[in-house]
Image (cartoon, helix red, strand yellow):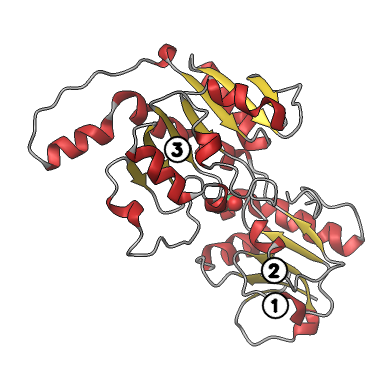
Amino acid sequence: MSLLILSPTRETDTWLQALQEEDPKIPIFVYPENIDNESVEFVLAWNHPYGSLKNYPNLKCISSMGAGVDYLLKDPELPEQVLLTRIVDPELSKTMFEFILAMVMNHLRGLTHFKQSQANQKWEPAAYQRIEDIRIGIMGLGVIGSYVAKRLIGMGFRVNGWAQSPKPNCKATVYSGSNELETFLNSTEILICLLPSTPSTHGLLNKETLAMLPKGASLINVARGDILVERDLIDLLDNEQLSLASLDVFQQEPLPNNHPFWKHKKIDITPHVASLTNPKTVAPQIVENYWRMKKGQELMHSVSRKKGY
Ligand code: OXD
């Protein structure tokens, strides 16, 4: 019986090495290696080809290689009885915080503006804001969102948060549910999206909701591209309702060559690199779940198909 790494879009050698070092006793294969499909009980997946998971009749658990599982749940042929788990790793939260801090400081100090001035050989000083001048709003207060809120508060930022349901342990001022969304957005000058992609968050950032932000506010999306209505963002930036957007995730990835985001002066693009799972730090939890699955024990970091995360 074996573990299969099924990820056509991610580099798999370091995953294989990290898992083998963690537990040399587990037989591990890498898709599309020619293997006996009946032997596969555990799949470690990322952006698998839809329909491919039904080829393993003895599959018991699918672990996502990342924090998100939206791509798994979108597979119309995802086997029904199989348990789903995801990665929860303090390292992922920490690197996400570091990326967000870099983006927030860019927004405060206008670095995108100076990069453009440099490209035009123009000496163009501009006013800046300080940490205590602005209010940050974080949408999505799961493990990563709550950690980012705590670290930003520790640095002196004023932080509000919004989630579908109340979060009593979160250090930020928390708003919850659709009836508190407008109040939350009204007082958010830099909006950070860390929501999971689910049917209820799909298209949630659109011309109505983003227009609830104060004029000149900015957006950082490090969650999933389908939460944002891309055309609406362009309109709001063009009519100066919003001032800047830092986008790490897109409806289509890689971002197509002819996409209007590429050349937009108020959009900074990064290629889905905000926080990448480190195979070495997560190998222990995957191995632990493999053996728990073998012994029929409860798995760590289980995913609710109903909630979508
Ligand atoms: C993740 C990601 O979900 O990298 O971990 O997007």
Q: Which residue is mark 1?
A: 51
Q: Nearer the viewer, residue 189 or 69?
A: 189
Q: Position of residue 304 (x, y in %)?
A: 81, 51
Q: Nearer the viewer, residue 23 or 295?
A: 295
Give the residue displayed 39% in from the left and 31% down from the top.
Answer: 241
Residue 174 vertical position relative to residue 94 in the rendered view, above or below:
above
Query: What number is the disc on residue 75?
Result: 2
Q: CA distance from mark 1 to mark 3?
A: 34 Å
Mark before the other along the chain sequence, 2 or 3? 2
Element on which disc 3 rests: helix
Q: Is residue 281 left or right of residue 230?
A: right
Name which quarter of the figure residue 64 lies in: bottom right
Q: Position of residue 137 (x, y in %)?
A: 55, 26
Q: Is residue 67 left or right of residue 185?
A: right
Residue 61 vertical position relative to residue 164 in the rendered view, above or below:
below
The reply to whether residue 265 is visible in this rendering is yes
Q: Position of residue 262 (x, y in %)?
A: 31, 54
Q: Amino acid at mark 3?
A: Phe
How many numbered discs, if any? 3
Q: Amino acid at mark 2?
A: Asp
- Pointers 2 and 3 in contact (CB under 8 A)? no
